[in-house]
């Protein structure tokens, strides 16, 4: 009999297609796993409601489970409650920083409002040199969940996984 722990162990290895150094478990988008006889129900929440990676994540979940002999899989997408960066694991934050992406700051209160003109660098450290003398160049970077920043000390550009 398949256990939830076995399924979670497999899913903990499914990488995010946009940031492959973190897994869906690291990001906190893996919300729930249920085993009902031979059926496995996986519940995920996107980082953004329009996240273009969700179709690929669904396929990757199904493929990972099928590789272990589990073919009766349903992947449910749940939008409420909205995902928050507070659900990201400490290991995920560390992996982002080591990869060169400034991790989100903890909000401690769930989703926060993100304004299009917000340019607050307080507490944002450069993942290359550690300097806090940074500036936001663009509210949107290579993906909607990241913004583009530059360190004024080492002059290196870097992405910041937005706080929300």
Image: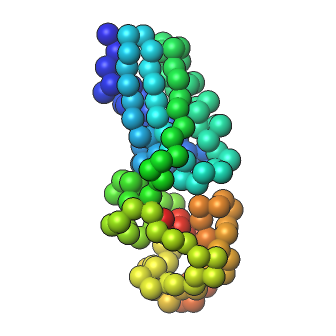
Above or below, comparing residue 96 to residue 32 in the picture = below
Residue occupying image coordinates x 45% and y 24% = 41
* Number of on-image labels: 0
* Residue 56 as seen in the image, left or right of residue 30: right
Residue at 64% from the left image edge and 45% from the top image edge: 53
Give the quadrant of residue 119. Answer: bottom right
Is the image coloured rainbow, by chain, by secondary structure, or in one colour? Answer: rainbow
Residue that sits furthest to the front in the current view = 80
- Quadrant containing the N terminus is top left
- Residue 85 x/y as whole percent: 44, 60
Q: Is residue 163 left or right of residue 53?
A: left
- Compared to residue 70, the image places residue 145 above or below, namely below
Say above or below: 34 vs 39.
Answer: below
Residue 141 picture location, percent across and down: 67, 67
Q: Position of residue 79 (x, y in %)?
A: 52, 46
Q: Which quadrant holds residue 8?
A: top left
Horizontal side, residue 123 vs residue 141: left or right: left
User: Can residue 103 be seen by looking at this rendering?
Assistant: no
Estimate the x, y position of residue 23 in percent, counting from the top left: 47, 44
The reply to whether residue 44 is visible in this rendering is yes
Left/right placement of residue 134 relative to residue 106 reads right
**Residue at the location (68% across, 47% down)?**
52
Q: Residue at x 55, y 72 (%)?
A: 114
């Amino acid at each position: 009999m398949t256990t939830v722990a076995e399924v979670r162990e497999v899913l903990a290895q499914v990488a995010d297609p946009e940031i492959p150094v973190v897994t869906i478990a690291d990001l906190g988008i893996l919300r729930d796993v249920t085993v009902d006889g031979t059926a496995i129900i996986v519940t995920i929440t996107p980082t953004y409601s329009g996240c273009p990676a969700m179709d690929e994540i669904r396929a990757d979940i199904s493929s990972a489970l099928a590789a272990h002999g589990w073919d009766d899989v349903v992947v449910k997408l749940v939008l409420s409650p909205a995902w928050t960066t507070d659900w990201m694991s400490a290991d995920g934050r560390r992996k982002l920083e080591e990869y060169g992406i400034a991790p989100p700051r903890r909000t401690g209160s769930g989703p926060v409002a993100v304004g299009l003109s917000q340019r607050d660098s307080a507490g944002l450290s450069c993942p290359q040199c550690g300097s806090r003398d940074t500036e936001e160049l663009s509210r949107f970077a290579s993906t909607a969940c990241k913004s583009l920043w530059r360190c004024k000390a080492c002059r290196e550009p870097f992405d910041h996984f937005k706080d929300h």
